[in-house]
Amino acid sequence: MALSLDDVRRIAHLARIGIDEAEAQAALAQLNDVFGLIAEMQAVDTGGVEPMSHALDVVQRLREDAVTETDQHALFQSIAPHVENGLYLVPKVIE
């Protein structure tokens, strides 16, 4: 897919970008290079390639899901300005 100079001007207009003729020509060349690279990448046969989540075959080290802290809920709420039924009360900010 190749863009034309009119396409670049229209895109610049939609993006509200002021662009002169030289900048439009440069942007056209760069965008067409990008689209050419995309076309090259799409031409590669990837039928037998397994999808992967990472370039390296690494395993995430996981820790055991165990409680290590004591429950300090009552302590934290003891210093709160307003608490009701175990919930913090805050002033209404959106009407």
Image: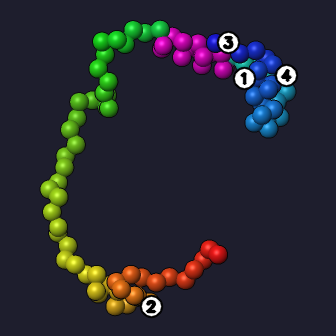
Q: Which mark is residue 27?
A: 1
The CA distance from mark 3 to mark 4 is: 18 Å
Label located before the other in sequence (3 or 4): 3
Secondary structure type for disc 3 = loop
Amino acid type indicated by mark 3 = Ala
Secondary structure type for disc 1 = helix
Judge whether residue 87 can be spotted in this image. yes
Judge whether residue 23 can be spotted in this image. no
Q: Identify the residue shown where x is 25% and y is 81%.
A: 72
Q: Which residue is mark 2?
A: 81
Please give the range of residues in magenta.
30-42
Rendered position, 85 above or below 63: below
Label located before the other in sequence (2 or 4): 4
Q: Position of residue 15 (x, y in %)?
A: 75, 36
Q: Which residue is mark 4?
A: 21
Q: Which mark is residue 2?
A: 3
Q: How many dots with numbers?
A: 4
Q: Nearer the viewer, residue 59 or 76?
A: 76
Rendered position, 71 above or below 46: below
Label located before the other in sequence (3 or 2): 3
- Would you call the spot at circle 4 few (<14 residues within 10 Å), some (14-19), or many (20 or more)? few
- Would you call the spot at circle 3 few (<14 residues within 10 Å), some (14-19), or many (20 or more)? few
Secondary structure type for disc 4 = helix
